[in-house]
Image (cartoon, rainbow, N blue to C red):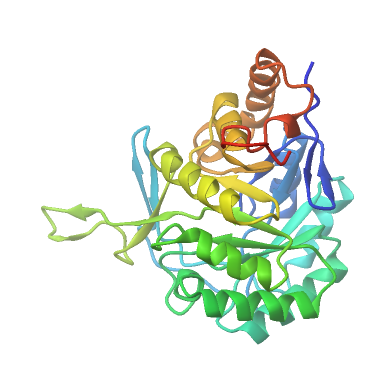
Amino acid sequence: MTELRAEVGTLTFRNPLLLASGIWGESGRSLLGAYEAGAGGVVSKSIGTEPRTGYPNPTVEQYGDWGFLNAMGLPNPGIRAYPEEIRVAREGGAPVVGSVFAPTAEEFAELAKAMEPTGVCAVELNLSCPHAKGLGSEIGQDPVLVSEVTRAVRRATKLPVWVKLTPNVADVALLAEAAERAGADAITAINTVRGLAIEPTLRRPVLANGLGGLSGPAIKPIGLACVWQIYERVKIPIVGVGGIRSGRDVIEYLLAGARAVQVGTAVATDTVRVFSRIASELEKEAGALGAERLSDLVGAAHPGPARG
């Protein structure tokens, strides 16, 4: 039987399956529900300094089994209101990673510091939303800005700092290197892939914002490629994201170099019950490969010795 515990730097999760930010995390009760359904930990929705309503409808378009195209616009209640939701999840025993977004390095640092007293186990910097103007990937596409934000947050907090990267760049590993040099404790890869849907009869984009982010099974090869490239060039842990809906998918991410993964679209389509199913499949898949621990598989598809 394979030990399913996963270590991401100094943090240990009961299994490597984390609820991704922006899915099922509107409230503390929903975060806790994901943990009670079998997730190893949960990532909050991305929180900013002030409340934000997000974009008008329509904000989501489903593409059958491929996934979702969405442009939500980072709706959230703001950092002053959200700690109460984190408290509910923490009191139920769920390890919570607090996701934050901001337009400047200084504001990222302030948000990270404000997350400290809430009891989160780490802070994830959302540098990768593909459709929020002046936020997300508009910052995360520039290694200099990635470095500035990460360094500011590292100075402001003792929490582990995870940097969530965008795939919408020429060299994602360059961004990971910038984050590592600036003091990041882990890399989260990836956020959604920029996309567009058009309604021919109306002659306009389907989503109110126009551009959106594609998630789900369609982007799994992109997520795997990014994790693979990052593993080749940084030493800090990687949390893989993108199209994970089975134990086999998790194994592939581990072999590419991830130590844990985040599950998002599969939760939206199958509810949080997906966590227990994936965990059961993962245990069987890892056992069939002869792995005593999941760390035995981390990076094992790369040439040379693995760093598990």
- Quarter of the image with the N terminus is top right
Query: Residue 285, percent across and down?
Result: 64, 18
Q: In this figure, what is the number of numbered marks? A: 0
Task: Indicate the quadrant where residue 59 lies.
Answer: bottom left
Residue 230 in view: yes
- Quarter of the image with the C terminus is top right
Residue at the limit of the structure toward the top, as seen here: 288
Task: Indicate the quadrant where residue 216 lies.
Answer: top left
Give whichever of 299, 50 is nearer the camera: 299
Give whichever of 75, 4 is nearer the camera: 4
Query: Residue 4, percent across and down?
Result: 77, 29
Residue at the limit of the structure toward the front, as seen here: 304
Task: Indicate the quadrant where residue 65 lies.
Answer: top left
Give whichever of 2, 137 is nearer the camera: 2
Q: Left or right? Give the position of 69 relative to 9.
A: left
Query: Residue 40, percent across and down?
Result: 75, 39
Give whichever of 297, 40 is nearer the camera: 297
Residue 50 in view: no
Q: Residue at x 45, y 54 (%)?
A: 192
Q: Which residue is drawn at 74% across and 53% down?
A: 28
* For residue 7, above or below residue 199: above
Q: Left or right? Give the position of 144 relative to 279.
A: left
Q: Left or right? Give the position of 243 relative to 188.
A: left
* For residue 131, above or below residue 153: above
Query: Residue 240, percent across and down?
Result: 59, 45
Q: Which residue is drawn at 71% across and 16% down?
A: 290
* For residue 202, above or below residue 64: below
